[in-house]
Amino acid sequence: MNGLKKERGNIVVVGGSYVGLKSVEFLANAMHESHNIVLIEKNSHFHHLFAFPRFAILSGYEHMAFIPYSNAFHACPPGTSRLVRGLVTSVSPGKVEYTEVLSPSQDKKTLDYDYLVVATGTHMPPITGKKEGIDGMKSSQETVKKAKNVVVVGGGAVGVQTATDIKELFPDKSVTLIHSRDKLMQTFHPQMHELIMARCKELGIEVILNDRVHIPQGGFPTDGRAFSIELTSGRTVPADLAILSTGQAPVTSFLPPALVSPTTGRVLVKPTLQLQDPAYSHVFAVGDVAEHGGPRQARPGFKQAEIVARNVRALEEGKGGELEVYKPDPAAIHLSLGIKRNVIFRNPAGPDEEPKYDMKDDGVEDVGSGRAWGMWAPGVQDYHS
């Protein structure tokens, strides 16, 4: 290059989730001397998803679930990272196409990249802005308050948290938790199931296992009238509110189908977290959207983001044969079992080991949302903006 300085390239992160923002942070600190970091995110605010189940039931904190991106890059070297409000529509080698969310004409834009990280997570109901999100949570709170017979469908973390929160806040309501497997939160050691079952018994929650719900075309009524939920076993469960907590599909529609698992819908990646297709060797996927074989939770996602940053740097330095491999740790979770009760649970590292857990009664109503604001928006004091 005859001593000429190389023009700064772009590293694009698609999705401003927990793992997406961490990806920006690690990449900016690793690559700021040679690259600009561009986050493409459609939402106006960071969605603090951990708090969504609680704030859809308990009033007074819903504004804390939507955190502005105004200081999201505080941990990055100054001037290295920027946010683009856009909806990505396609990714090809070296180029990403997106629609400008704030453009009245919904203009399509393209951006060249040297490296790209997919961190889009899973599908959530569209929320155009903070006001709409707050209004939706307030509406959900009123619906829960009015209900007498609540049925929660899905025994994963969100379903368990929702059922235990409702029953603790409204002990006179009938709450039923239905799960299609023989154990709640079945990806964890069976002792997790036992802990949850004991808590449900303590609260008076009926648990139905190994049975599936027939969801009618158009969904269940939402107007408060009584109805019956039919199960595949032939059993019926009375309800006037059904809450579906059966998980969401990964967000991958902007990728060519060949890059996505036909069975799970997740992005197919190598152990280095690069996409499996050799044409996309400079594209990585992290978090819930990636088929990486590890737990689909925030902390493992942070570890993946850190590995991606190191691998991008290695590729840029011509060390493609020395890329780091992601090795999943045992699954762990901090799970609320009501407003105060919570458990920190970690799966055993080996088949001959026992899980580790710590049951506490030190939970807070806002599920620690103040800490989330301190992490993603330090110094921002206007929680309603």
Image: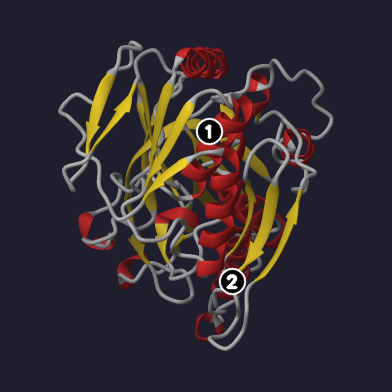
Query: What residue is drawn where x is 58% and y is 24%?
Result: 170
Mark 1 surroundings: few (<14), some (14-19) or many (≥20) residues within 10 A: some
Say which label, 1 or 2, has the lower sequence index.
1
Find residue 122 and report its horizontal and vertical position in percent.
41, 45
Q: Nearer the viewer, mark 1 or mark 2?
A: 2
Task: Point out residue 26 in the picture as x, y percentages from the top left corner.
Answer: 67, 58
Q: Nearer the viewer, residue 277 or 320?
A: 277
- In percent of the image, x 52 and y 53: which residue is there? 197
Q: Quadrant of residue 328?
A: bottom right
| Residue 143 in the image, given as x and y percentages of width and height | 46, 15
In the shown orientation, is residue 83 left or right of residue 105?
Answer: right
- Looking at this view, is 252 or 35 the one in front? 252
Q: Is residue 273 left or right of residue 179?
A: right
Picture layout, residue 318 above or below residue 255: below
The quarter of the rendered structure image containing the N terminus is bottom right
Q: What's the amino acid at mark 2?
A: Asn
On screen, residue 131 versus residue 265, left or right, reads right
Which residue occupies 62% across, 44% down?
337
The residue that mark 2 highlights is 347
* Residue at the spot of label 1: 84
Amino acid type at mark 1: Val
**Splitting the image into 4 quarters, where does residue 352 fall?**
bottom right
In depth, the one of 128 and 70 nearer the eye is 128
